[in-house]
Image (tube, grey):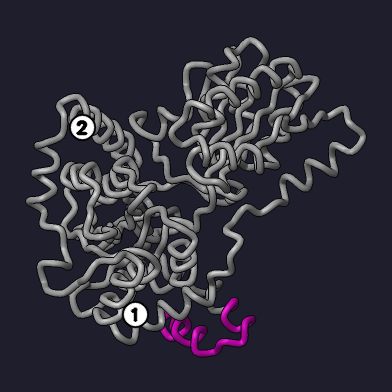
């Protein structure tokens, strides 16, 4: 049985502080390995990708046809999907597109009280690279969540890189690529794919922004290349915080906690409740459900290693403060009236309101993006949006009158900072 923490325990603060400060990132130091891979890709280009793809994926990039997945294959995969699955993907895409369409920012252009024209123009980046994992983590939903906001933003060129172990591509991912309208799909993965997107190679033209989930090597490659390209975020293991009172169905809450535990052994699921008996019921349900899950081994490791249950005396009064310190990726509010808690929780990647809103719905068809900050990064960052694929250019324009109104102050500040050429460029015009 997992120990239950209680806010009434004398050592609760010390235990909770350790929970907040714990890092669940990959326990292998991959920074050096990734740096070597990126250097090799920058130096050797396509030849490096050939070597790494053969070594890690068992796939030979022997000729031109081996490098890319034809877009016609994506159209075929979409057409051959069972009708109900095709409809589900179409529904997800439509809802994701509608939600992100509403995020588009507006340009500004106005004249202020001094007569200065001010404003800003929003433009999409020219090209975006979308990393799509292969193997166990091949998720068509993630491709939709990354590609559709880019398209809505107006990105002209969408490039997908995805590993295809032994040459096998995930048919659902190909179908999702067709729905999203990607332009290129390259059969390369890992840190080397991120390097290729950032630096460019003989075949792969570089991009401006790289987004998408991946393993520790992919995340580290994005971290090291930030500045060469833009990135969405450095993502860590998945996490969910469920705040639930004892009036919930324990089977439902158990399933919600396991929805993240099954992702990876390093994922974390946390329950905060005001009912200790309910917490134990949830744990019993977790044990039963894990025994029936195809992903049970992963979920069991995650739950046994990182699962946490916390009992508070007053859920409304205590849970939001704890949630703010955890700053979790996903926060479920399984209570009758979630609105006060929603307003009180300042740090969360995404919040799911009420007993009928499981996090899993948000992963697929609700509309908001499921690419969210982990590892307490919700304190300072947000989930993926159209803004990750756009940049803002400010502009200003002055005439003689407006320059006379604000120019003298600029000259005085330039002198104060010891920058006489700055001051002169203003003062010559004032004369």
Residue occupying the point 28% across, 75% down? 49
Q: Nearer the viewer, mark 2 or mark 1?
A: 1
State left or right for residue 403 relative to residue 104: right
The span shown in magenta is 412-431
Element under disc 2: helix
Element under disc 1: helix
Q: Residue 147 location in percent, x, y? A: 27, 49
Q: Residue furthest bottom?
A: 421
**What type of secondary structure mainly makes up the magenta span?**
helix
Does 29 appear above or below 164? below
Does 117 appear above or below 137? below
10 Å neighbourhood of mark 1: few (<14), some, or many (≥20)? many
Query: Which of the image's four quarters has the N terminus?
Result: top right
Is residue 119 something that shows in the picture? no
Q: Which mark is residue 41?
A: 1
- Mark 2 vs mark 1: which is more N-terminal? 1
Q: Residue 136 location in percent, x, y? A: 38, 47
Q: Residue furthest right?
A: 10
Residue 424 belongs to the span the image colors magenta:
yes
Q: Which residue is mark 2?
A: 90
Residue occupying the point 9% across, 37% down? 79
State left or right for residue 236 relative to residue 24: left
């Amino acid at each position: 049985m997992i120990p239950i923490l209680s806010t009434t325990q004398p050592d609760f603060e010390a235990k909770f502080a350790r929970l907040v400060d714990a890092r669940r990132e990959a326990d292998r130091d991959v920074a050096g390995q990734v740096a070597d891979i990126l250097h090799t890709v920058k130096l050797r280009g396509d030849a490096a990708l050939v070597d790494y793809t053969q070594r890690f994926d068992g796939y030979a990039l022997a000729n031109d046809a081996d490098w890319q997945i034809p877009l016609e294959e994506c159209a075929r995969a979409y057409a051959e999907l069972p009708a109900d699955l095709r409809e589900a993907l179409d529904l997800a895409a439509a809802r994701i597109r509608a939600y992100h369409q509403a995020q588009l920012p507006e340009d500004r252009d106005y004249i202020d009280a001094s007569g200065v024209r001010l404003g800003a123009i929003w433009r999409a980046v020219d090209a975006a690279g979308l990393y799509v994992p292969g193997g166990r983590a091949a998720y068509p939903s993630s491709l939709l969540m990354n590609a559709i906001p880019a398209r809505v933003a107006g990105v002209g060129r969408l490039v997908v890189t995805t590993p295809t172990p032994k040459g096998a591509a995930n048919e659902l991912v190909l179908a999702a690529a067709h729905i999203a309208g990607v332009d290129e799909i390259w059969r390369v993965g890992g840190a080397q794919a991120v390097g290729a997107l950032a630096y460019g190679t003989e075949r792969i033209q570089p991009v401006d922004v790289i987004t998408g989930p991946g393993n520790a090597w992919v995340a580290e490659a994005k971290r090291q290349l930030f500045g060469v390209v833009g990135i969405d975020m450095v993502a860590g293991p998945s996490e969910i915080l469920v705040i639930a009172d004892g009036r919930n169905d324990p089977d439902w809450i158990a399933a919600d906690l396991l929805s993240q535990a099954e992702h990876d052994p390093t994922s974390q699921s946390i329950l905060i409740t005001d009912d200790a008996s309910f917490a134990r019921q949830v744990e019993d349900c977790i044990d039963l459900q894990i025994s029936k899950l195809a992903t049970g081994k992963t979920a069991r490791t995650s739950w046994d290693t990182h699962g946490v249950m916390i009992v508070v005396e007053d859920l409304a009064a205590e849970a939001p403060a704890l949630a703010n310190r955890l700053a979790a990726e996903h926060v479920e509010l399984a209570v009758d009236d979630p609105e006060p808690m929603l307003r009180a929780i300042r740090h969360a990647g995404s919040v799911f309101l009420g007993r009928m809103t499981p996090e899993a719905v948000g992963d697929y068809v609700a509309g908001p993006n499921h690419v969210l900050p982990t590892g307490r990064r919700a304190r300072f960052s947000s989930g993926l949006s159209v803004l990750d694929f756009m940049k803002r250019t400010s502009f200003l324009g002055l005439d003689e009158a407006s320059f006379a109104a604000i120019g003298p102050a600029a000259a005085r500040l330039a002198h104060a900072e010891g920058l006489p050429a700055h001051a002169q460029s203003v003062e010559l015009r004032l004369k």
